[in-house]
Image (tube, rainbow, N blue to C red):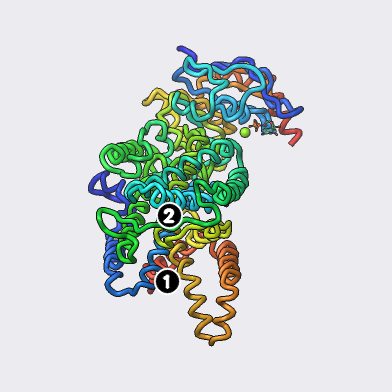
Amino acid sequence: MTDLLAIEDVTKRFGGLRAVGGVSFTVKAGSITSLIGPNGAGKTTLFNLISAVLRPTSGSIRFDGHEVTRLPTYALARLGMARTFQNLAVFKHETVVDNLLVGLHTRLRTDPISAAIFLGRARREEIQARERVEEIIEFLEIEDLRDKAVGTLSYGLQKRVELGRALAIGPKLLLLDEMVSGMNQEEREDIARFVLDLRDELGLTVLMVEHDMGIVMDISDHVCVMNHGEKIAEGPPAAVSVDPHVIEAYLGSRRAA
Amino acid sequence: MRTGHFKESYGELVALTDSSVTRAWVGLLVVALLLLPLVAGNYGLSLATAAMITVVGAVGLNLLTGMTGLISVGQSGFLAIGAYTNALLLADYKWPLLASLPASGIVAGVLSLLVGVPSLRLKGLYLAITTLAFAFIVNHVILYAEGLTHGPNGVFLPNASLLGIDVSRDRPLYFLVLAVTILVVLAVLNIKRTRIGRAFLAIRDHDIAARVMGVDLVRYKLLAFVISSFLVGIAGALLSLQIRFVNVDVFGLILSIEALAVIILGGLGSTAGAILGAVFLSMLPELIRIAFSTFGSTQSVTYTTYVYEIRGIAYGVVIVVFLRFKPDGLIGLWRDVRRYWTNWPLAY
Ligand SMILES: Nc1ncnc2c1ncn2[C@@H]1O[C@H](COP(=O)(O)OP(=O)(O)O)[C@@H](O)[C@H]1O
Ligand SMILES: [Mg+2]
């Protein structure tokens, strides 16, 4: 298997705080990789670096053969990277359909003038976009919510819409940041099933930050563990779960909390 | 109850509205506007014309502030640019109106790049500040570039005609403004249902998520600013046709504030709201005038003496009251009412 994502010696400092320090790992194409670690370990910051929301202080990130470290954030969607956010980042005043349609932004071409006229090409493009969104709506089983403003939905459903929006990008790599936290057991199982389906049926590669160890153990092929901004372990789930460093990191943080 | 929904085709899904009731009302409104000149006198007609010009400007500002979440307090500058471009092209350069009208919007749009390119890379209130400065500069240039703009003397518009019809008369002007207003509203509604409008809304609601979805923030903010300024420029050109004499005093900064009042009153982000707000606030001075005159002649004198102060206060009060009690504006009020009546008699 080839590496879809390669992180090499990446460091991010916020002033004096080193949120991520010298982290390296790779994500194999077609795999489900989990990134775990106690709160404050630097997982979200690493996600922000991978998705070019933040610039690393040093190090390099390669995605699908492109050096993405210095690219503007918006360029990554077109390259096929999509993500969700730990704290909801939906467009809450818009409907579910419109949220998903924003995900299609880079796949659409309409220029301002044909948009204003909305005949011919612009209209055809919108119709195709709606068809594509309809597939995602069916996949995520949210048919009843199409026209609801996303802000009015439950937390779990908003997260599901955010996943749909990321899927609309048509990504090769999907980054999920604590997708299931705040969800009930049934919603969690739905999400785990979706993630497996995405990998198995669409060949997506998934990198997820996850605290739900049940899900991590069940569906990941590979697990990376971070603590205090550094990678402390990596390997198959079974091996990582018995790694003394990992146990120490988790117990340490429990004790501190 | 509608659950999910079943459409005949995807064509219907991208239509402006799927409600036949809405379609009927809009149709009725357009017919009423077409018939208005038969019943309204010249005064009524010129009020309606002024209201529609306000609608064009408000819809333009709403695209920027309501849809994209960018605040400009200097759109009066672009109104002035549109009005002067149209006036000067007609008066000094003998352009036909068919060319000077779009040119007014284009000049405003192009000049907006001057403000937008440096300020839209920055976040927050930079645009508000630069546009404010820009509006001052525009007024200054108008006053001192006498060779181009006639300076403090202002510009008288010649009788302009469009397709052989003299639009300096009330009725033809009314129809011209009506046609432009309908086109502008349609264009903005259309933009809103494409990837461009969605990018604007995304920037307003969550700019980081918008970037991650592939939206180039600088480019789309600039686009919103250019389109908005273009539309405001068109409104300026229409205004010049109505007032027949443009002068720098017409374009005071208070206009920008009034314009913000219009879209706040209407309900930020909603095009229908911008229309309602524009119509309501255009009529407000008239309502105040009527109120004052019904209370006798002394109050009438007070009104004429302090007309600008009274209008200013009224706008201020409207902004504060709506921001405090009805942040979703007139359009929100309208939705509440409609919800009430659809649920009636099972109302909550
Ligand atoms: N934008 C920021 N500015 C300053 N410090 C930050 C910023 N983002 C995260 N941090 C800090 O970086 C550390 C790692 O945070 P984060 O990446 O959110 O951890 P995790 O997602 O693993 O819980 C924390 O100490 C956090 O306070
Ligand atoms: Mg986190």
Q: Position of residue A29 (x, y in %)?
A: 46, 17
Image coordinates of residue A44 in percent, x first then y, are: 61, 31
Residue positioned most to the front: B147
Q: Nearer the viewer, residue B292 or A103?
A: B292
The residue where tag 1 is placed is B347
Residue pictured at 71% horizontal, 33% vertical: A254
- Disc 2 is placed on an element classified as helix
Residue B347's place in the image compared with B12, above or below, is below
Answer whether residue A66 is visible to the viewer in this image: yes
> Residue A138: which numbered mark, if any?
none
Chain ID of residue with mark 1: B
User: Do badges 1 and 2 share one subunit?
Assistant: yes
Q: Amino acid at mark 1?
A: Ala
Chain of the residue under label 2:
B
Badge 1 vs badge 2, beta-carbon distance below 8 Å: no
Query: Which residue bears the numbered disc 2?
Result: B235
* Amino acid found under the numbered disc labelled 2: Ala
In the figure, is residue A201 to the left or right of A87? Answer: left
> Which residue corresponds to the image point at 49% horizontal and 33% vertical from the top-left?
B216
Q: How many neighbours does mark 2 have within 10 angstroms: few (below 14), some (14-19), or many (20 or more)?
A: many
Q: Residues within 10 Å of mark 1 (few under 14, many from 20)?
A: few
Q: Nearer the viewer, residue B141 or A219?
A: B141
Residue B306 to residue A245: above or below: below
Left/right of residue B131 with respect to residue B54 in the rendered view: right
Examine the image and state in which quarter residue B127 appears.
Answer: top right
- Report the quarter where the N terminus of chain A lies: top left
Q: Quadrant of the C terminus of chain A?
A: top right
Q: Residue at (35%, 47%) from the top-left corner?
A: B95
Give left or right: position of B55 versus A130. right
Residue B239, picture quadrant: bottom left
